[in-house]
Amino acid sequence: MAELNLKQITDKLNSEFASDVRKLVFWYDANAEFQEDIDGIELENAKVLHLEPDNQFYIKYFLEREDTTTNYLVYAPFAKPNIRDNHLADTIRYSKEFFADRASLLTLDLGIDERYKPVIQHYIKFFGNKERTQKFYDLKIENFNRSTIEVALMSVLCKDKTASYEEVLRSILTDDGLQDNKYLAEFEKYDLLSAFWQQADVAFGYNDPKPTLEKLVITMFVTYAAKSIHTDMPQAWKPFVSYKFGNIIAFMDNLMNSYLYGTRFDEISEIIYNAINGKNYLEKMEVETLVDCNIFAGVDELLMSWIIGRLENEDIGAKLNGKTIPELCVERRKQHFGKNFRSEYFILQNAFDMIAEGKYQSVSGIKNLVKKYMETTYKIDRYYRYFYFYFDKLEDTTQFEKIRELVENIYTNEYLNRITVNWNNEFADIDGETGLTLQRDFFARHINYSKDRVVVIISDALRYEVAHTLFEKMQADEKCNASIGAMQGVLPSYTPLGMASLLPHKTIEYSPSYDVLVDGKACSSTEQREAVLKEYKVNSKCVQFDSMKTMKQADLRSIFTGQDVVYIYHNQIDARGDKAASENEVFTACEEAIEEIYTLIKRIASQANTYHFIVTADHGFIYKRDKIQATDKIAGAASKSNSVGQRYSVSAEEIKADGVCHTTVGKVLGSVDERIVSFPLASDIFKVAGAGQNYVHGGCSPQEMLVPMIDVKVDKGKKETSLAEIALVSLTSKITNLITTLDFVQTEPVSDIVKETSYRVYFISDNNEKISNENIVIADKKDKDTTKRMFRLRFNFKNKKYDKSQKYYLVAYDDKNDIEVLRHEIIMDIAFADDFGFFG
């Protein structure tokens, strides 16, 4: 009970006892509404006597014999008995009766119009509890009518902080199940069920002689589907289509896009999809009619099934509603259920790119081949890498097996073998001169004369296409200025020779036992490499990445202080790929390597006052998922070689076998060593015992030989960056339809200083009521052409009466920090909205 009601009663009673004449006041509280409050009433000139049905004689005796001078309020928490059973009837005749009607007090206290007092009286049981009543007061409702009172009662029972039927329904759906819902049980307890269903009719057009929560939710999902699926609804669904689709779409979008309740929406969506036999009915529809529907995960399953069918037939020209397969994949990833099928859509997108671009056409001239690979061809290796990166995330890959076989066949036979043969033929024609800087000239060209401190990060097996992904990540960072190039690696393309080539030296050579020596010294350990480096740069260090991962800032800074050059050795890709047990995890290792190197650079720049970095590698690698059959391996390498791997042999003699190329150690290292380096012409491997077969290197291919070099300079001062903004293009000042489409534009392309973000766009009234659905916009377009950054949003307005004199606004909020970034005033001029079914 609200304190003001008690005060009113107290004031009224105290006025009754204000005179000097002794007075007895009888209060029969028929519904015991004030039983909890009676002892809290502070009477100034009277005491309270509690009357019970079985103590009437005592009270009569007490008042007329024992205490005949004190004023008393005689409180009875029951109805006044009839005169035959009322032993106090004669006492009451010379006393006074007090009446406190809770409904009247509430009506008066809250400022409710007297005509709505029967509504309060109807729900008086609700107000029999202090806590419930206080929460009703706390809602601070300004305009009372039957509807607002009933919604407020429901809101209290649902523990909502605002009086809103949409919030009531949201609580009901998200906090309990569709069967035996605890909130509906509470409504029934307080006689609010019929009011709840009446509100469902008013808000969402749900009218049913035998209403259920499940049928209400089916109505909302089917109505939404009817507006986003571009074909007739199945006959079984039609009875559920409501004319109040604007209100339904607004409610559903807000629930679907909610950070708090999105997961529960997914659960409800699955329940309803099964309840309406969604899969069976949607499968019978033309798939292009489903492209804009995003309320059932089953729609994505059907779209993916269609895409899989097209890709299995290599139909890369297929479109749905004018959208290509990659466009569909990108668009569906951004839709609500895209998070559930992120890996699947990436698999399909990369499979499409493999099918579309993976059939290699030979290039004439090694320099042309190098140029084309570095500009475009490397992407085929990336498509393949990301295909398996996401493929390996799935627990069940059954539906993608045929596509996997197709991708594998294209990559191995139509790309990798062809480009490797093309490379080696052209490589032989120019006697191994690609025109690129040689890896063994790295120190002399890029480190020796550097004027600032340089950190060289050498990531074992970071091949060019993986490095290009890292480069793009660096490029997108507003504090980084990055460029990428490539060096011609060594043969064999393996760690001992690659690491040696990156060190300063006068000579690199093989010992008689095939150990690699720099200036006659061993260089296989970090300590040995640091000793070599210090001979050329006194102020230098070599460290392992793993030793720096958990280092405190002071220790990290001490590594770089006073140094001219620091070599950091990072080993994520090769460590995983070189072990047969983990070689199929190599693409996961690539992704981790990108993130680790990026994070390392940012950390050193911010904590160790060092801003110039060069990221490179000792060699690249070739990876194929399917193992080579034993009969396809090149035999004869092991028995005639003094040093051998899957993709190389170093020996005094050539390997006499078909499909094998040769050069000399002297040619590779600029010496007179006549020993022979042999390597496969194609992407095959030598028959070597006990080695992995999927991940290999040591041979001669663009993937192994084009060693990346990323030059990164981190700005000391942060660049002024901004978020990508959106603006309304449509010159709209008036809304005349419940469904309205508006054009917008992302004002600037995403770049190193303009960062992508996401917005929530919808319409509100002057008092902040959301009157339309909510559109999520991801501002991530990089196109320089403004027209390509334009997009269209569709708004469904609540079906209600709009006041032309009231202000309404189109608003956009930055989704990450909830800041309003756009407000456009409009007039709502929708004639007769909410009056006739065909306007809904």
Image (spheres, rainbow, N blue to C red):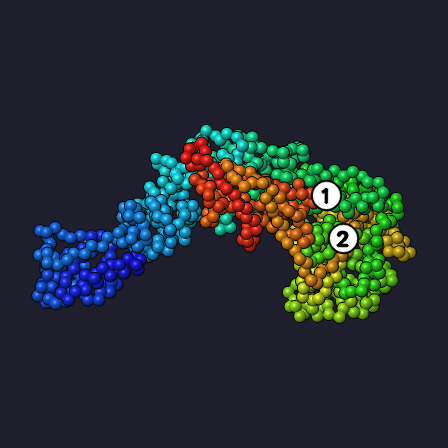
Q: Horizontal and vertical percent for residue 36? A: 26, 59
Q: CA distance from mark 1 to mark 2?
A: 18 Å
The answer to whether any part of residue 587 appears in the image is yes
Task: Give the structural element (helix, strand or loop) at label 1.
Answer: helix
Identify which residue is drawn at 76% across, 67% down. 541
Name the spot of residue 604 as percent of width and height, x first. Answer: 69, 63
Q: Amino acid at mark 2?
A: Ile
Residue behind mark 2: 484
Q: Residues within 10 Å of mark 2 (few under 14, many from 20)?
A: some
Q: Position of residue 637 (x, y in %)?
A: 81, 48
In the rendered image, residue 766, in percent from the top left (x then y), is placed at 47, 48
Instruction: Tell whether 646 sits left or right of 392.
Output: right
Label 1, residues with CA under 10 Å away: few <14, some 14-19, many ≥20: many
Reading the image, the residue beneath label 1 is: 380
Q: How many badges with numbers are in the image? A: 2
301 vs 617, left or right, is left
Element marked by disc 2: strand
Q: Is residue 225 above or below residue 506?
A: above
